[in-house]
Amino acid sequence: MKQAAAEGLRKSDNQTVYQTPAHICRAEAPKQRRTAGTRPPLALPARPAACLEPVRKPAEHRILLRGRTVTYELTRKSVKNINLRVRRDGSVAVSAPRSVSLASVEAFLREKQDWLLRALLRTAARSPAMPERLADGTAIRLFGVQKTLCFVPGPRNSAAVSGNALMVSLSRPDDPALRQRVLTAWLRERCREAVLACCRAHYPRFAALGVAPPTVRFRSMKTRWGSCQPAKGVLTFNFALVHASPACIEYVVLHEFTHFLHPDHSAAFYACLSGYLPDWKQRREELDRNAP
Ligand SMILES: [Zn+2]
């Protein structure tokens, strides 16, 4: 069947649902070898509910792994080994003996980075991008990263990321309609910012090929991530992209821009797209897997 001109980027109907348990990785501390027969503890104590100050708050650290900032909680305790765990909500917990330096913990995380990043990707795919009920402690995906919603009283309605939390301060934090309105407006603004920045970054190569600066619009769409109307010079993007990773957003932006050169999904279109983004297939798979 021939594709209609300016065909948008369709969401896949098939969403993969992962049912695996929380990903747990244990390994020996660099300096203290595990003696035969002893096993490190399986898991850290349950995570305290969001917004509630835990009795003993684990220290929050950040580490850059393959270009992605990973936030993890580090707890010092009487354990023999460094234990690494990715919880079902996507948070990362590390426990380490008191004698092990932070540099050793970081070296351990770098050694385990492939496992850790894969586990985070699977966790993100398993949980919904946008929760149905906006409650304290509910998980929400922001640019491919799991965050925990936290509604707090504040002088003005606003939202901000703080570590693993998405803090939404409201004049009436218990008002469900206000929660929805403020959060939606904030997410839409973040979506606009990210997509427009990506459009600005990639436009010059299309300008060089004679593409006029497009009008960029945003909408909530059920079946498409984006669409292009070459004759009108209009690109339209789905607000739901705020849940997708930056790599996926870049794929959608380049896909739609490429339609200015090839309005259909012909071999020439894909040849052109592959030139800009050789790994576009993997990015599309990730996008479909994480479809809201
Ligand atoms: Zn397309």
Image (tube, rainbow, N blue to C red):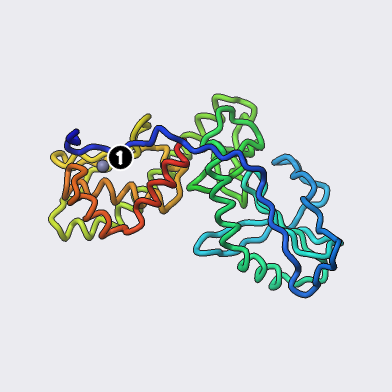
Residue 71, image x, y percentages: 62, 56
Amino acid found under the numbered disc labelled 1: Leu
Residue 223 seen from this side: yes
Residue 140 image offset from top left, x and y in percent: 56, 39
Residue 87 percent across, percent down from the top left: 67, 47
Which quadrant holds the N terminus? top left
Question: Which quadrant of the view contains residue 114?
Answer: bottom right
Circle 1 SS class: strand
**106 sits to left or right of 247:** right
Locate ligand 1 by image quadrant.
Answer: top left
Mark 1 sits near ligand 1, with its Cβ under 8 Å away: yes
Q: Residue at x 60, y 38 (%)?
A: 19
- Name which residue lies at 53% across and 42% down: 125
Residue at 55% x, 28% y is 132
Q: Nearer the viewer, residue 204 or 31?
A: 31
Q: Position of residue 201 (x, y in %)?
A: 31, 58
In the picture of the structure, the residue carrying the numbered disc 1 is 9
